Image (tube, rainbow, N blue to C red):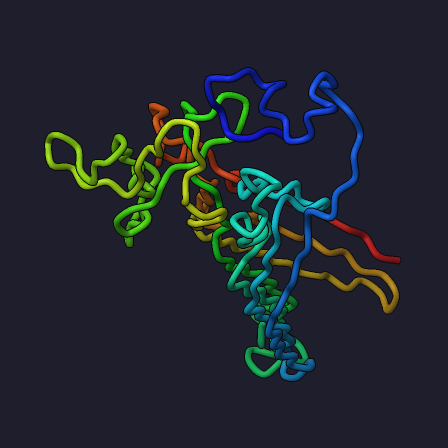
Amino acid sequence: MIQPGGPTSIPLRRLIQPLNNISTWVQEDPINASNYNGLQVSYNKRYSRGLTALIAYTYSKSLDYGGSAASGGGAAGNPQTVTNLRAGYGASGFDQKHRLVSSINYELPFGAGREFLHNGLVSHIVGGFEVDAITTYASGLPFTVTLNNGVNSGSPSWPNRIGSLGKIDHGNPAKFFNATLCPVGAVTLANGTPCAFQTPPANTYGNSARSVLYGPSTKNWDLSLQRRFKFFESKSLEFRFDAFNAFNTPNFSTPNSSLGAGTAGQILNTVNDNRDLQASATFYF
């Protein structure tokens, strides 16, 4: 591990000078710890009148000092330096404040043995249908703002934070957060544009926090319609039509958070597939 950049060479800035001529070695450090707190609520409707439902909601917060083994830290990343781990304490890369998932199954009340239209030819036409729906809502994941052109040679670089930390209440993919970067000592650009972040002095670490901003939320609906035709007591044929991401809703990734890059503050990708339609038939015997 080295100190922030400076006029001297990297070997001379290594913290353990007797080992300054060793470029790579395996080491083990107690550099991470995490905590998770959450509230979990669920509602389970037992089957009645053709309807069954399971709804689960989680309100939570996960904090740690660096990338997590399972997730790689997401876009949160690691602290700038192990010499000040407390400055890297922030939301885990997988932290989601809100998450709601509902699963509903409903047998439409039409046809033989149902509440409506249970006699005659119409009952055979409209009966036997079943609808399934899975809905997911989730808060966005955190990300860390960095500098595209660092001020430390051989060390990570984060900016200093000023203003409102870059959050835009109604951010969109073209400008999800205020990525305007001011030079050292300035709070606005020459044209008066306000800045949320500032380039720190050379050979220093910026004071912007790890996981300081959150990306866009995600939402998805999977729907299916199925109908079963019964031929004999033990034999039936089921037709099923599924629509994954039924409303073709785009879920966006975290924005480019490397300040100074041409696309800083912009979202360039989605994290889900387009609508996918699927039809199938199953014979039960």
Which x, y percent locates residue 225? 60, 58
Classify the position of the C terminus by image quarter: bottom right
Which x, y percent locates residue 111? 62, 74
The part of the image, by quadrant, that contains residue 116 is bottom right
Q: Residue furthest left?
A: 191
**Residue 198 versus residue 38 in the image, above or below:** above
Q: Which residue lies furthest to the front in this view?
A: 18
In the displayed structure, does residue 183 sit left or right of residue 26? left
Q: Residue at x 54, y 61 (%)?
A: 135
**Residue 11 versus residue 132 in the image, above or below:** above
In the displayed structure, does residue 257 sit left or right of residue 79? left
Nearer to us in this view, 252 or 209:
209
Q: Does residue 276 appear in this view?
A: no
Which x, y percent locates residue 281? 73, 48
Classify the position of the N terminus by image quarter: top right
Q: Which residue is drawn at 53% across and 27% down?
A: 155
The part of the image, by quadrant, that contains residue 118 is bottom right
Nearer to us in this view, 251 or 51:
251
Q: Which residue is drawn at 49% across and 48% down?
A: 211
Nearer to us in this view, 233 or 242:
242
